[in-house]
Image (cartoon, rainbow, N blue to C red):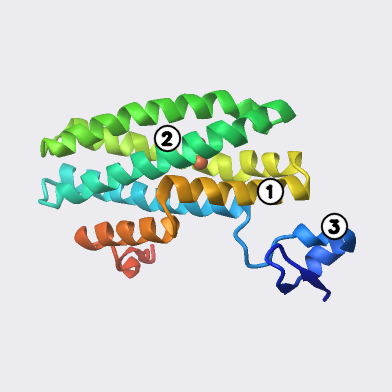
Amino acid sequence: MNQIVNRRGILAVSAVAAAAVPLATCAGYVDAKDVGAVEDLMREHGILRRLLLIYRASAQRIRAAQTFDIAALNQACAIFRQFGEGYHEQKLEEAHIFPAVAKAGGEAASYIDVLKAQHARGRAINAYIDSATKLGKRDTRLADALDRFELMYEHHAAREDTIVFPGWKEALSASELDDLGDQFEDIEQQEVGKDGFEHIRTRVAAIERALGLSDIGQFTAPLP
Ligand SMILES: [Fe+2]
Ligand SMILES: [Fe+2]
């Protein structure tokens, strides 16, 4: 284990960092507990996946003709549009990740066109979900839109997590990645405010409570 000085001037301990980076370049190295750019993107996907599970549960209830809090579904859609589309997709992926990945080439680059098309289709579907839920609709067209959006976005985020983000990380140097991590934190503060991630997570948890989805034990699968 070696001690290094992080960007806040605090002594940080990191065996990995010291092994990979000469000590002279360590002054700007991230604290081991800082959220890096890729971890940031992936935990944002975690928020979006929780919203997708809200979409799925809502579609099931519509199909089963069960009553549920449609306003809570509308709030989930609003968070997806603001946090997922306005911030994660447009300010991070389309502005920073996709151009760098396209330039680097390789397998990750081959996904960029379809990922962009899915962002655009997702925006159109979420605009429909927003207006349908504001009107209090509970019909098959809405249930289909929720299910199809969920299926598309699960495939989308899984490819980003396993191919596009690793490809992006590969294309950058450690210091570029560190700088972008800082830049992403600034963009996050501008777009969703200070403690934005925690605030969004609290709002998602409140929607889950309203829809009876908080206790994940209910989803522990029965034995076959
Ligand atoms: Fe995306
Ligand atoms: Fe994404």
Residue that mark 2 sits on: 152
Residue 40's place in the image compared with 162, above or below, is below
Q: Residues within 10 Å of mark 3 (few under 14, many from 20)?
A: few
The disc, 2 or 3, on the residue closer to the chain's N-terminal end is: 3
Residue 179 is marked as 1
- What's the mark number on residue 25? 3
- Closer mark to the observer between disc 2 and disc 3: 3
| Position above or below: 156 against 15 | above
Residue, x 15% and y 47% (percent of image)?
A: 70
Residue at 74%, 30% in the rendered image: 104
Residue 169, located in which quarter of the rendered image?
A: top right
Residue 51 at x, y = what percent? 34, 49
Asked if one can make out residue 189 in the rendered structure from this viewpoint, the answer is yes
Decide: few, some or many residues near mark 2? Use Cα within 10 Å; few <14, some 14-19, many ≥20. some
Callouts 3 and 1 close, C-beta under 8 Å: no
Mark 3: amino acid: Thr
- Amino acid type for the residue under numbered disc 2: Met
Q: Amino acid at mark 1?
A: Asp
| Residue located 34% across and 34% down the image | 148
Q: Secondary structure at mark 2?
A: helix
